[in-house]
């Protein structure tokens, strides 16, 4: 049996060292990416809201070269109902699920080299981003429900006087 010769060569792979994240073509995905970036910064600046980073697993070891936080000020931790809802929605997801591990690698540990992280999880780079998007959609739905329930419960309180203005 003779090996099959290709009549063309593949284009070289794109350099992922400056990978800027998932494809954020539509506004909703871009908005959720920004909210997750804010959540990541929120957790990093308020350590008691997130578990301490452990260097015992593969994803944590890959995070030695992590992406910097984009400092856009972020919402105030004590006054942001949205950040609390997102945080609770994220913590409510199955801990050992592959998409949860992908999310924590990207936003929690902030791994810089996505191909290495994906390879460590046994998936492709494209599948990594697909899982990240699906996880984000599920968390957004859960966070919206949590926030709506909290606002509805707030209206039933005897001291409720109306919606509060957003604090910048």
Image (spheres, rainbow, N blue to C red):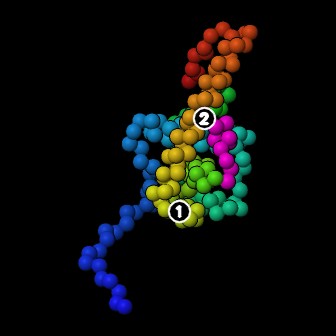
Question: In the rendered view, would you say 123 is above or below 42?
Answer: below
- The secondary structure type at the circle numbered 2 is helix
**Which numbered disc flags the more N-terminal residue, 2 or 1?**
1
**Nearer to us in this view, 126 or 87:** 126
Residue 75 appears anywhere in the view: no
Question: In the rendered view, would you say 166 is above or below 84?
Answer: above
Q: Where residue 37 sits in the image (x, y, percent)?
A: 54, 41
Q: Where residue 125 sits in the image (x, y, percent)?
A: 47, 59
Give the residue at the far front of this rendering: 1
Give the residue at the far left of this rendering: 7
**Would you call the spot at circle 1 few (<14 residues within 10 Å), some (14-19), or many (20 or more)?**
some
Numbered label tally = 2
Examine the structure image and report whether residue 93 is included in the region drawn in magenta: yes
Question: In the rendered view, would you say 101 is above or below 10?
Answer: above
Q: Which mark is residue 142?
A: 2
- The residue wearing badge 1 is 123
- The secondary structure type at the circle numbered 1 is loop
**Nearer to us in this view, 39 or 72:** 39
**Nearer to us in this view, 112 or 11:** 11
The residue stretch that appears in magenta: 87-96
Q: Where residue 24 sits in the image (x, y, percent)?
A: 42, 44
């Amino acid at each position: 049996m003779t090996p099959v010769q290709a009549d063309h060569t593949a284009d070289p792979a794109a350099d992922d060292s400056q990978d800027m994240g998932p494809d954020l073509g539509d506004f909703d995905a871009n908005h959720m990416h920004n909210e997750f970036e804010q959540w990541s910064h929120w957790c990093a600046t308020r350590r008691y809201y997130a578990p301490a980073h452990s260097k015992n697993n593969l994803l944590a070891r890959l995070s030695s070269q992590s992406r910097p936080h984009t400092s856009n000020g972020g919402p105030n931790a004590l006054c942001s109902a949205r950040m609390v809802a997102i945080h609770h929605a994220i913590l409510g997801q199955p801990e050992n699920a592959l998409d949860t591990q992908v999310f924590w690698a990207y936003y929690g540990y902030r791994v810089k080299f996505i191909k290495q992280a994906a390879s460590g999880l046994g998936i492709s780079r494209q599948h990594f981003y697909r899982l990240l998007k699906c996880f984000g959609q599920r968390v957004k739905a859960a966070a919206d429900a949590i926030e709506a329930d909290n606002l509805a419960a707030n209206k039933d309180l005897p001291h409720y006087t109306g919606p509060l203005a957003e604090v910048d």
